[in-house]
Amino acid sequence: MAKQQEYDAIVIGGGHNGLVNAAYLARAGLKTLVLEQRHVLGGATVSEEIYPGFKFSVFSYVVSLMRPEIIRELELVRHGLTILPLESTITPLPDGRYIYRGPDSAATFRNISQFSTRDAEAYREYSYAMYHMAKAVKYILSIRPPDPTSFDPRELLALLKLGKHFLSLGEENIYTLAKLMTMSSADFLEEWFETDPLIATLSASGIIGTFLGPRSPGSAYVLLHHYMGEIDGVFRAWGFARGGTGGVAEAIASSARALGAELRTEARVAHVITRNGRAVGVALENGDEIYAKRIISSLDPKLTFLKLVDRSELPDDLVARVGKFDSYGSSGKVNLALDGMPDLSCLPGYGEHMRGAISISPSVNYIERAYDEAKYGRFAKKPYVDIIFPSAIDPGMAPPGKHVMSCFVQYAPYTLAEGDWNSQREAFGDAVVDTLSEYMPNLKNLILHRQVLSPWDIEQTIGLSGGNIFQGELSLSQLFFLRPAPGYAQYRTPITNYYQCGSGTHPGGGITGAPGRLAAIEILKDAGKVLQ
Amino acid sequence: MPIPSPLYSRTAALCTTQEWRDWSGYFSAITYGPSHEVEYYAVRNAAGLMDASPLYKYEITGPDAERLLDRMVTRNVAKSRVGQVLYTPWCDEDGKVIDDGTLARLGPQHFRLTAADPSLRWLQDVGYGLDVELRDVSTQLAALALQGPKSYAILQSLFSNPKLATLRYYNLLQTEFNDSPLTITRTGYTGDLGYELWITPEQAPALWDRIMETGAGYGIMPLGLAALDILRVEAGLLLIEVDYSSTLHARIPEQQSSPYEIGLGWAVDLDKPDFIGKQALQAEHAAGTPRSLVGLEVDWHDLERLFGEAKLPPQVAGRASRTAVPVYADGEHVGQATSMVFSPILKKYIALATVRSEYAASGTPLEFEITVEYVRQRASATVGKMPFYNPPQKRALPNG
C-alpha cells in the first residue's frame, strides 16, 4: 500500500463543480488534487466521440447559467470556453402548425398571434414579469444559505439581509413569488395564456430533470431558472458550449491546471479516511492512500454521506435524511449521429429554426400523460422531448454536412415496474425515434448511430445516484437551506475537514459552477483565506 | 445615395433585415438576420463571408513601383518578398497618418494597395517623375472576406490547392477561378484565421456562391458590418474616422495622429531611406509620443454597482458604439474611448481608447464615462493587453 504525498485539498470527482472548486482552491494557493473515476474529466459535463467523427454531449447538453464571475475569475475564455447562442424554440404540432419563439420578437408575436393575439401580447408581459422574478431569486443563488435556526450573529445578519432583499421586491413581486413557489407550472401559466401548446412548451421548462408533471405543485418554481440567464443580459450565460458541454469541463480543467491543481483520471475513491472525526485522506480502489488537510466531495449527497464515509461517523438524523433524499431520475437521453439534417414537416429546410431547440410538447395533457406512465414505472411511449442539433450550432461536432442530434427525453423512471433497463433500453429508444418521426418523417433514414441512455445507464456511467441529473430533485423541500439536509447546507459536514461542493448542494443542478464556487468560499474561510 | 456593389445580387437576397449602411458609396449589409450575434459567433467559431468590395484598390506597376511605395508608406517595401502583404499606414510631411491599408506584392514590380479613402491623386503626387503606372482598380476588383477558424477548410475543400496549407499570415497566392485570375491573401479585419479573395466583378457572384455552398457544412454565415465592428474591436484593429482621423478629414491639428499615437509605431521603419514624414517621425520617436492607443477593460463589478444604484442590470452596447466618451485618471481628463462594445466571447466590456502616454501602461487604473439613466457616471477601467482576443489560429498554419 503506497502512502502518497500530502495535499492541502483533495476534491473527489472531476465533474464541473469539482473542477471549479479545485480551481478556486488552487488559485488561493492550496495544493489541490482532483480524483476522477473515469478516463475523462467532466462528469455529466462531457463530450465524447461515441461514433467516429461525431462528438456527442453525452449527458448534459446546454449550459444553463454558468456564472459570469466564474468565467471571468477563472479566465475560462482564455482556456477555450465559448458559449454559442441558442435562442429559439419551435414546437411542431400534429396538425402541421408550429409555435415559434425566438430573438426576433416581432416574428414571435406574429406566430403566437396565429393561435391567440391575446397570448402574443401576454407573452411579452410574461417575459418581463419572469425577468423581475428571476432578478429576485438570483440573489439567493449567489449566497451561501443562512441557517434559519441559528442565533449566531453571522447567520442572523445573513437572514436579515435576505429579509431586506425580499422586502425590496415590492408587494406585487412577493405575491408572484409566493405563487411560483407553490403552484404547478401549468396552473401558473394558465393564468397568463390560453393556447394549450404554448402553455405545454413553457411548462416543460418546469419539469426538466424533475420527477414532476406540469400539473404537479412546485413545478412552477423551476420555470424561473430559465429566465436567470436574462438577468445577465448581454452576458448570455445560457447557450451551447463550443465542443459540446465537454468544452466547459475542458476549459475549467485547463484553468485549474494552470492555477496549479493536479487532475488525475481513472482514480476511483473507495472511501474517505477519517481519524477522530476528522477527514485526513482518501483510499483509492486500487489500495493507494492519499492524505490531505481537507477532503471535498463533489459527488451527490448519497455517495458523499452514505458511501464515502462510514455511517457511524454521522448523526443518525442526517443518515436518515440523506437516505430519503429524493434523487430518482426521470429523464433519459437519446443521441443520434445523422447522415444529414432531417426536415420538420411543419417547416421543412435547414433554416435558422434548426439552430435552436425543438420541443415535442404538443399539449399539457400530452406531457402529463407521459408523466402518468412514469409514475407507475413505465417509460413514456409518447414522451416529451427537448431536441437540439449541436452540429448546427457548432459545426465542429460532426463532419461537414452530417449532424448530431441530442434528444433529452422525459419521462424514463429509474426503476421500471417490469423488466430492467438492460432489456428495455432499445424499446425506449424506439419509442423516442417513433415519436420524433411523426414530426420528422425522414429521420429514420438518416440515422447512422444511436445511443440510448436511461437513468440507470447514467448512474452506471458517471455515478449519479438514481440517474438524477441534478444530483437530487430540485423540489422546494430540497432547496436552499434544506439542500442537501437541514444544518448541512453550508458545504460543511459533521466530519471536520470534510466538505461537499456538488449540485446536491445549494443552488443545485445545471452547468452553473455555483455550488463549486460557493463551497470554495466556505472552505477557504475555514482555512483562514479569502476567495479573491 | 449608395449604389449596388458587384455582390449586391447575393447580399441583397440574404439581407432579410434590409439594414444597409453606405460604405464608400456602396450598399453594405449591417446585419443579415435579426441577430448580428449569430454572424459574430460564426466568425469566432466557424466562418463568415463578407463583401469587402467597397475598399479602394490601386495597382502600382513599373520599374519604380517599389521606390514610389517606399517613399509613401512607413514600412520597408524594399525588404518585402513577392507574395508578401504588408499592413501599413502612410503619412504626410508632418508624420501624421493619411490612411492605412494593405500592400500586396504581386511581383517584383507589381503591387496592389487598399485604402479607406480615394488615394490615386496622392499616389500620383508622390510618384511624380517616377517610372510607374498607376491604376485605380477599385471598380475592377471585387473583394470577398472569408474569416473564421473554418475558413481554411472551406477554401481547401473548394480549391484543393496544396499552397493554401502553407500560406502564412500576411502572404498571398495567385490562382484562377472560372479562368479568371484570383488572388487570395491571408488577411482580414477580424483577428482570426481568415482570407480575402480578390477577383473580377464578373466572377465575384459565382465565387460567392461556391464559397457559400461549400461552407454550408461548416456553418458559414454571411457577415455584416455590425458583427464585424465587434470582431475588429476584440482584435484591437482601428477604424479610420472612428478611432483616429485622417489628416484629410481633421479640422484642427489636434485631431491628427501620428502612427505612434495610434499603436502603429511598429509599422514605422526609421532605418529605411527617406520617406514622407520621416523627419517628423524621427523627432517624435526621440522626444516621446504624447498620446497612445490602448485597450480598456471596464470593471464589471463597478458597472453592476453603478447600474445597481439605479436598480438596473448593466446596460452596455450590444453593437459596437462609435460615440466617443471621455476617459479620466484621478478625476482628470486624460483621453477618450472611441470604440466600445461588450465582447460576447470574453464576457468583458472593452474599448479602444487614446490616452496621454503616461497612462498607457498595461494595468493602469482609469475611469470611463458611462451614462446610467441619463446621468453621467464614471466606471473604473483598466488598461489591458491588446489585442483583447488573439487566438493561435490567427497566425499559425492551418491544420484542417
Image: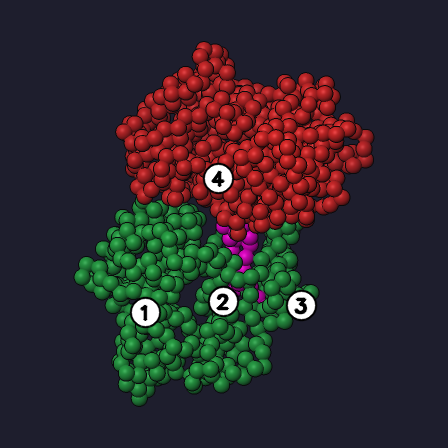
Marks 3, 1 in one chain: yes
Q: Dots 3 and 1: beta carbons under 8 Å?
A: no
Figure check: A314 above or below A399? above
Q: Can residue A174 be seen at all in this image of the molecule? A: no
Front-most of residues B318 and B176: B176
* Magenta region: B334-352
The residue at the far left in this view is B179
Chain of the residue that carries numbered disc 4 in the rendered image: A
Q: Dots 2 and 1: beta carbons under 8 Å?
A: no
Residue placed under numbered mark 4 in the picture: A246
- How far apart in space, not on screen, are marks 2 and 4 (Cα)? 39 Å
> Does the segment drawn in magenta span residue B344?
yes
Circle 3: element type: strand
Front-most of residues A232 and B150: B150
The residue at the far bottom in this view is B129
Residue placed under numbered mark 2 in the picture: B243
- How far apart in space, not on screen, are marks 3 and 1 (Cα)? 48 Å
Q: What color is chain B drawn in? A: green
- How far apart in space, not on screen, are marks 1 and 4 (Cα)? 41 Å
Q: What color is chain A drawn in? A: red
Residue drawn at (69%, 65%) of the image: B330
Residue placed under numbered mark 3 in the picture: B332
Marks 2, 3 in one chain: yes
Front-most of residues A419 and B302: A419
Q: Dots 3 and 4: beta carbons under 8 Å?
A: no
Marks 3, 4 in one chain: no
Residue placed under numbered mark 1 in the picture: B83
Marks 2, 4 in one chain: no
Circle 1: element type: loop
Circle 4: element type: helix
Three-letter residue code for mark 4: Gly
